[in-house]
Image (cartoon, rainbow, N blue to C red):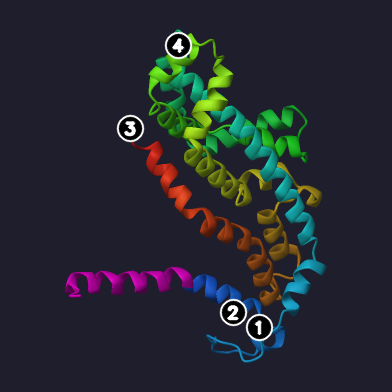
Amino acid sequence: MKIKPGKIINYILLVIWGLIVLFPFYWMILTSIKGYGAYNSEYVPKFFTANPTFENYVTAFTAVPLAKYFFNTLIFTVITTGLMMVVVILSAFAFARLSFKGKDLVFSLFLSLMMIPNELVIITNFVTITNLDLRNTFMGLVLPSVTSVFYIYLLKENFEQIPENLYKAAKVDGTSDFRYLTRVMLPISKPTIVTITILKVIECWNSYVWPRLITDDPNFFLVSNGIQEIRENGFGRENVPAMMAAVVVISVPLVVLFLVFRRKIMDGVARGGTKG
């Protein structure tokens, strides 16, 4: 088959860009399997190692409570994502199918919240959580993250693609709104719901500013804050290979999650942003 020169150039550029994007991950993994002495003896960084070792991974779990950080993050991610999905699904259904006075105005106000800088929201949330005496608690970590205007908008657009005649026919048959939502709308909108769930999991796993602000007790640190704690007060500044090993361990779940569900993420975003 004859390949056009333009396609060859595109492929070459894509390969170059792919190498640029993947190089930091390669360097992170490479550093994590270098010995402490070998790493410090390199005056000029080497792009390979002749004697790989997994001792740094053992150090990452034994020198600091990395497993506890993992467990805290898992609890935070599961609870936050579960509560947010309930709020988002019910809100999107209300805006997409229910009729009530001032619906358009309320939805417009919801969308306007996306224009408020996150810094202002963080300040308000911090004052609220502090006044409720919820600092250094999982409740304080979870509450500010149980809703998202963007995800409500995304799912609402997806719900509106479902013909309204189905809803009217279901109401004629005496079907309740909740039954219609669970039996009809959720199965049809499954790609978008899966996408929102995955994106929220990634968001929770990478959460840094809010957990760092609301917790100063290591018992409630998440993996992102744990890495910062390792860098500041642990072995991070001295033992860089062990630090990179901890970063690899933390990054692997998200990389695997994205690789497994990347098609569903793209399909869900495309469905949510297309009407008709």
* Residue indicated by mark 2: 30
- Is 178 or 99 nearer to us in this picture? 178
Q: Is residue 182 left or right of residue 67?
A: left
Q: Quadrant of residue 126?
A: top right
Vertical relation: 124 (above or below) 235: above
Q: Which residue is mark 4?
A: 99
Identify the residue shown where x is 61% and y is 36%.
145
Mark 4 Cα-neighbour bin, 10 Å: few <14, some 14–19, many ≥20: few
Residue at label 3? 275
Q: Residue 24 location in percent, x, y?
A: 51, 71
Tag 4 or tag 2, which sits nearer the N-term?
Answer: 2
Residue at screen point 57% across, 56% down: 257
Mark 3: which amino acid?
Answer: Lys
Q: Nearer the viewer, residue 44 or 103?
A: 103
**Dot 3: element:** loop
Q: Amino acid at mark 1?
A: Lys
Query: Does the rendering let one see residue 116?
Result: no
Of badges 1 and 4, nearer the viewer stands: 4
Of the image marks 3 and 1, the number of the one nearer the N terminus: 1
Please give the range of residues in magenta.
Answer: 1-22
Asked if the residue under mark 1 is in contact with the one under mark 2, i.e. CB atoms within 8 Å, the reply is yes
Q: Which numbered disc covers residue 34?
A: 1
Q: Earlier in the sequence, mark 4 or mark 3?
A: 4
